[in-house]
Image (cartoon, rainbow, N blue to C red):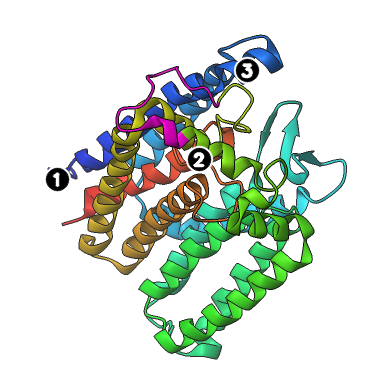
Amino acid sequence: MKQSRPAPDLWLFVCILSLLAIGMVMVYSAGAVLAFHEYGDSYYFVKRQLLFAGLGLVAMYFTARTDYRIWQKYAKVVLLICLALLVAVLIPGIGVVRGGARSWLGISSFGIQPSEFMKLGMILFLARWLSRPDYDISSFTRGLLPPLGLMGLAFGLIMLQPDLGTGTVMMGASMLIVFTAGARMKHLGLLALSGAAGFAALIAAAPYRLQRITAFLDPWSDPLGAGYQIIQSLYAIGPGGLAGLGLGMSRQKYSYVPEPQTDFIFSILAEELGFIGGMAVLGLFLVLVWRGMRVAITIPDTYGSLLAVGIVAMVAVQVVINIGVVIGLMPVTGITLPLISYGGSSLTLMLTALGILLNLSRYAR
């Protein structure tokens, strides 16, 4: 009789569902006012979020039950599809412009963000590429430059939209896979310096990005312009205190914090649920990262280990950037909070990726 695999990591599973449930409540609470004002229906955002969550949970169920090694076989196909979508979204008449960025494919209010799917596509491919027994990542020209070239191509296509936030998450997760695969520290140090120079050039090339940097350093220099989002976010977090104003009692969601159901949902959460609520959410993310890294350490093969690192890194980098922006430690970038913020592509993609991580946990020792 064939021996069945153990069940997925229970801690990991409970964390995912808990964060998703908190996200549902906060999407309604944070977005009800804006939804009623814009669409005449206070439940507009939460109803769509429930639909996306349902699709994501179905995808998570299938990826959690699918042997992770099948992604090693189809990683190249997935990456090519993601690259094709990134090219398609840049074509006028095919790509849809929202919020000043040509980042969407779809019809009317329904659409997908190819850049979101590229994050997972890149992780799947890099894990396969760098886990080959004959691959020498310690060599700069033969080992490190080829994956960097691929990452640079994907990042360049994302920046043409432009979408610096998603591109940064993809690059951050990819670089952590490269580091885990055994890249030499001196090579990574040189790349970090050149990357910082390139990042500075990207900021200088677009006036709105430079405004965000200056606003981050001193938001009160332009309180009604570039510094407005950070100031209103801090105005939300401050009054929350220890226990918050109470669920649904936020004042800043009344057209003060822009898009309170997406990028700045954590500021509304902190206002309504206080320090305790905010730390509870951070604690759930920390447990998710801990259990995910435990899977990466204990799984017996290199491909599975790198794949787990990439998925955990994708979550962790996105959480750090989002909350860093919300509390004023980073410039505004436009990144959602995983499993909490409103968003179709980001939520569905995240649940799909976490389903793969749950499957990986079944093979961990």
Mark 2 element type? helix
Query: Which residue is the site of mark 3?
Result: 35
Rendering coords of residue 178 (x, y %): 44, 73
Query: Which residue is the site of mark 2?
Result: 234
Seen as rendered, the residue at the extreme right is: 92
Specify whether residue 348 is in view.
no
* Residue 331, quarter of picture: bottom right
Front-lying residue, 133 or 163: 163
On screen, 356 above or below 191?
Answer: above
How far apart are labels 3 and 1 at the CA level? 51 Å
Rendering coords of residue 255 (x, y %): 64, 25
Q: Residues within 10 Å of mark 1 (few under 14, many from 20)?
A: few
Mark 3 element type? helix
Residue 169 covered by magenta stretch = no
Tell us which disc is closer to us: 2 or 1.
2
Q: Which residues are magenta?
A: 237-252
* Quadrant of the snapshot with the N terminus: top left
